[in-house]
Every structure is written in C-alpha cells, then in structure tokens.
Image (cartoon, rainbow, N blue to C red):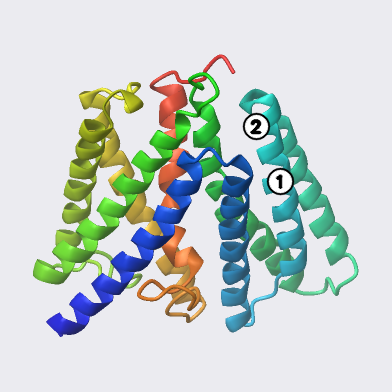
Amino acid sequence: MISTTRSVFIRRLCSSVALWGVALWIIFAGFEVGFFLLVGTIALLGLWEFYRMLDHKNLPNFKVLGLICGVIFISGSFLYYSKIGLAHSYDFELAVILFFLLVVFARQMFERTRDIRPVETMSYTIFGFLYVVWLFNFVTKLVYLFPHAGNHFTGQYYVLYCIVVTKFSDMGAYVVGSLCGKHLLIPHISPKKTWEGFFGAISFAVMGSYGTLFLAGDRLKVLTPLHAGILGVLLGFAAIIGDLAESIIKRSTDTKDSGHMLPGIGGVLDLIDSLLFTAPLLFFYSRLVLGVGISQ
C-alpha cells in the first residue's frame, strides 16, 4: 500500500513539475503569445473534460457552443489585457458572458421545452464555462495586474507564487493525509480526505508562501511577511475547496478522473482544479487589500 501511494505521488509530482515548468518557462521568457496559447489550451481542454464528464452521466449540454465562447472569451481578454489594459477588459468580459447567455437560450429554442431538460442543458453549459474558463482566466489577469518594469513583466512572479502555494497545499494534503490521516473530513464527497490532511495543506501552503517570498526577494515586493502569512492560509484553504469542488462534480458524474492525459494526475481539470479558486482569490486580494492596480 505504501509503495503504491509513493508511486502515485511520484508520478503526480513529476507530471506537475514538468507541466508547470514549461508554463513558467514560457511566462518568464516573456513570450506572450506562447503564454496565451498555453493558458487557452489548458482552459479549453479543461472545459472539454468537464463536458465529457457530463456526457458520461448523460447530462445534457451544448459543448460546442461552450467551447466556441471559451475561445472568444480567452482570445479577446488576452488582447485587451496586453494591448489596452485590465480596466477596459471588464466590459468585454461581461459582453461575452451576455452574448453566451443569449446564444445558449437561442440554441435551446430549437429543442423541446416541455420538461426540465432545457433548464438543465443551459445550466450545465453555462456553469462549465464559468467554472473552468472564467475562473482560470484569472491566471492571465495576474500577469497583467502588476506594473511592468520597463519592457519586462513582474506579474509572472505572482503567478509563480500562486502556483507554488497552491501545489504546496495539494502536496501537504496528500502527504500528511496519506501518512497520518485518520479522521475523515467530508466522506460523502471525498472518502480519502482527512482533517489531518486539511491542516497539513494549510501548513504546507504557509511554508510555501514564506519560502517563495524569501527566495523571490524584491520580485514579490508587494507582499510583506504579514500578507504572506495571511495569503498562505487563504490560498491553502481555497486550494482545498477547489479540490473538493471538483470531487463534487466527479462524484455527481460517476467519474474517477476528469481525463487520462496526465500520468499520476488524471486530466487537465484535475491539474488546475485548485488554481481555479486560488488565482481569483490572489487577484482580488492584490487589488482590494494590497491596492495593486486599483487605479486601472
């Protein structure tokens, strides 16, 4: 049992390090188009996996419409962030969401409307878009939120910070829970999650937060030790919620993993489930508490 757990952990760790290593290399290289393609591809694959999980349970959805609007949303948002700025992107994002709602309702008009299925179809389609594409797009927002140093980005360091703290939380939950987890956290959602793993996740997240702050030095100059401690707790908690949120979806659709693309992890959505909550939290904490880009 220990050998199997260790093998799964090693495969999961190697996949995560390799994938996020490529992502961060692209970010730090300043290759904006590459970063856009990477984030866009991950978001669309995650959305595709979400709709495929619905298909596994025979739950109705308009996956093609969802994916098309996902492409429009990601592409347009990136254009606004990079060329115009965050301030002018909100109108575009709301316009795309409104357009998406209109298109989904228009599409449903060609289907039967005498039972609950139309409401389910529209709800599942819209929820998938918001849950995967809209939330994951905050990773890109973090890059453009922080001011540039000349022609160089500084936001990539905060993306790195977010990823490290998030993955430390996941690692803490997995390691501590596997080694000494005895008291189940929410067994009806995830029978393997324990309270020991919960506190392990928070502790590892705080350590990851302080460790990254120490190693990054002035590159994370907006963060103070106080904020690093607070964010460690908040991001660690958000990572746990993100993991459990996907567990709810997987349990509801009778699927073990969102996909099989990544050894030891499962699917793309399994890789980013925690980031779907930690990236938006760090973005709004930076704006509303730290005051970053508040004038934008």
Residue 176 horizontal/vertical position (percent): 14, 62
Q: Secondary structure at mark 2?
A: helix
Instruction: Point out the image quarter for the N terminus.
Output: bottom left
- Pointer 1 or 2: first along the chain: 1
Q: Position of residue 183 (x, y in %)?
A: 14, 67
238 or 269: nearer the viewer: 269
**Above-or-below relation of 277 to 52:** above
Q: Label 1 sits on what residue type?
A: Ser
Secondary structure of the residue carrying tag 1 is helix
Confirm or deny contact between disc 1 and disc 2 (CB under 8 A). Answer: no
Which image quadrant is residue 16 in?
Answer: bottom left
Q: Is residue 182 visible?
A: no
Q: Is residue 131 left or right of residue 243?
A: right
For this orientation, the residue located farthest to the top is 295
Q: Residue at x 56, y 59 (%)?
A: 42
Residue with the most extreme left position:
180
Report crowding for label 2: few under 14, some 14 to 19, many 20 or more residues within 10 A (C-alpha). Answer: some
Occupied quadrant, residue 225: top left
Across and down, in percent, residue 222 comes to 35, 21
Q: Callout 1: few (<14), some (14-19), or many (20+) C-alpha neighbours within 10 Å?
A: some
Q: Which mark is residue 61?
A: none
What residue is pinned by disc 2? Answer: 82
Q: In the image, is residue 77 above or below residue 58?
A: above
Residue at left offset 23%, top offset 44%: 208
Amino acid, disc 2: Ser
Q: Mark on residue 75?
A: 1
